[in-house]
Amino acid sequence: MCGEDEFAELMKELIDEEAPRLFAVVQELGERVDGRIAAWGMAFADHVEVIADCGTRLSLRDPDRACHLLSLAPDVTARLVWITPPTPE
């Protein structure tokens, strides 16, 4: 057993190691004619969870699969953008 401060530090380390990475899937319409954020996602160690802008939720193997699914329309290209978390002030 450990003290409250040590336990809090251990939990913080666990959270830092296990936190999902955040990403967006951006769709490019045409050849840079227009663009939009089509979905937001969280990448865990073994899968990703994606929420499209229409509200559809997907559980996938990897973020590249989300890009593939969101680029099936004609003249649409999707790309993954990893989000850098803001640093605490």
Image (cartoon, helix red, strand yellow):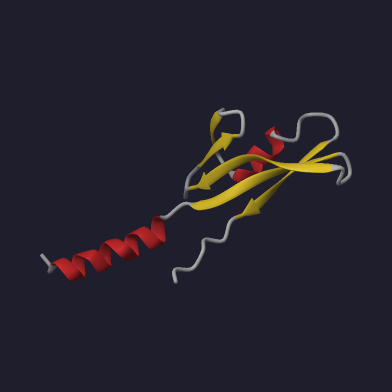
Which residue corresponds to the image point at 35% horizontal and 58% vertical from the top-left? 15
Which residue corresponds to the image point at 67% horizontal and 49% vertical from the top-left? 80
In which quadrant will I find the C terminus? bottom left
Q: Position of residue 13 (x, y in %)?
A: 33, 65
Which residue corresponds to the image point at 49% horizontal and 68% vertical from the top-left? 87
Which residue corresponds to the image point at 20% horizontal and 65% vertical from the top-left? 7
In which quadrant will I find the N terminus? bottom left
Residue 58 vertical position relative to residue 25 in the rendered view, above or below: above
Q: Position of residue 26 (x, y in %)?
A: 70, 44
Residue situated in front as seen by the camera: 18 or 77:
77
Q: Is residue 37 left or right of residue 35?
A: left
Residue situated in front as seen by the camera: 60 or 83:
83
Residue 57 vertical position relative to residue 31 in the rendered view, above or below: above
Q: Which image quarter: residue 71?
A: top right
Q: Position of residue 64 (x, y in %)?
A: 65, 44
Which residue is the extreme one toward the front?
A: 89
Q: Is residue 60 left or right of residue 81?
A: left
Residue situated in front as seen by the camera: 68 or 88:
88
Q: Which image quarter: residue 27?
A: top right
Residue 50 vertical position relative to residue 14 in the rendered view, above or below: above
Q: Position of residue 39 (x, y in %)?
A: 62, 39
